[in-house]
Image (tube, rainbow, N blue to C red):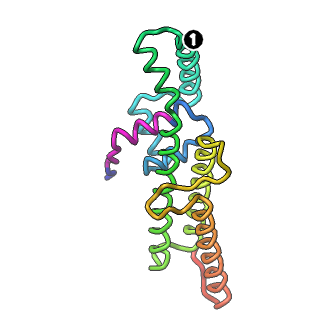
Amino acid sequence: MTRKIQIPPGLKKRAHQLYFHNPEVALPAIAALLGMTEATFRRYRENWKWPPRREALAQARREKATASRDVCDPSPVKQELAASQRDEGPKLRDAALSLVRITQTRIDALAARHAAGQVQDDKAAKLLTDYAKTLATAQALLKHETTKRDEVACDDDDGRSIHELRDELGRHLEQLVAEQEASRSDGGMVEG
């Protein structure tokens, strides 16, 4: 039996924004933002009647071109549309920060499960590699949104930057490798 993932409307709207308007954001990163696998994200996109990514991006480009031609039109609706397109920066930053928070939570949970012996070393290493890719995507989003700053700091609860999170991830990976090597050198069998 599969459980239904409840997605808040605001989060779905952010995912929609990233899917349709930000080609630099990979589909796995959007799926991670929603807290689901790529396969589950594919099923949800089909249920939501979202077109394939290439078509979605092309549609967004056409709409943006049409909106930019109509920016000189004084009608309030068209002015509001133009203003909302200029306001995409904070939404992108929010999405990137959400990715960082979700990834941080998952890294902490993985570390606890690994310490309890519930996750094999190889699986933990693979998951940490995936989390590193997600953090890299979040970092790219933040750099894209804030090109004027050299270093981007996260506004999450503990105030750690992407670089600090990446360093912590590196420490987790080194610890896993060291534990795996120690297990092998002790003559222990590593299941895999």
Residue position for label 1? 69
- Would you say the magenta stretch is mainly helix, strand or loop? helix
* Quadrant position of the C terminus in the picture: bottom right
Q: Look at 52% across and 28% down and name the residue there.
A: 86
Residue in front for this viewpoint, 188 or 44: 44
* Image x and y of residue 52, in percent: 53, 29
Q: Secondary structure at mark 1?
A: helix
Based on the picture, tell me whether residue 153 belongs to the magenta stretch.
Answer: no
Q: Which residues are magenta?
A: 4-17
Tell me if 155 is positioned left or right of 47 in this view. right
| Amino acid on which the number 1 mark rests in the picture | Arg
Left or right of 24 in this view: 89? left
Q: Residues within 10 Å of mark 1 (few under 14, many from 20)?
A: few
Residue at point 49% right, 31% down? 87
The residue depicted at 55 percent of the width and 13 percent of the height is 66
Is 6 inside the magenta-drawn segment?
A: yes
Q: Nearer the viewer, residue 75 or 121?
A: 75
Relative height, residue 111 to residue 183 (above, below): above
Is 89 situated left or right of 11 in this image?
right
Res 27 quadrant in image:
top right
Q: Nearer the viewer, residue 139 or 177?
A: 139
- Residue 108 locus on image (x, y percent): 47, 68
Q: Is residue 12 left or right of residue 164?
A: left
Count of residue discs: 1
Residue at image position (56%, 67%) is: 123
Q: Measured from the top left, where is residue 190 in percent x and y?
A: 60, 79
**Rendered position, 13 above or below 166:** above
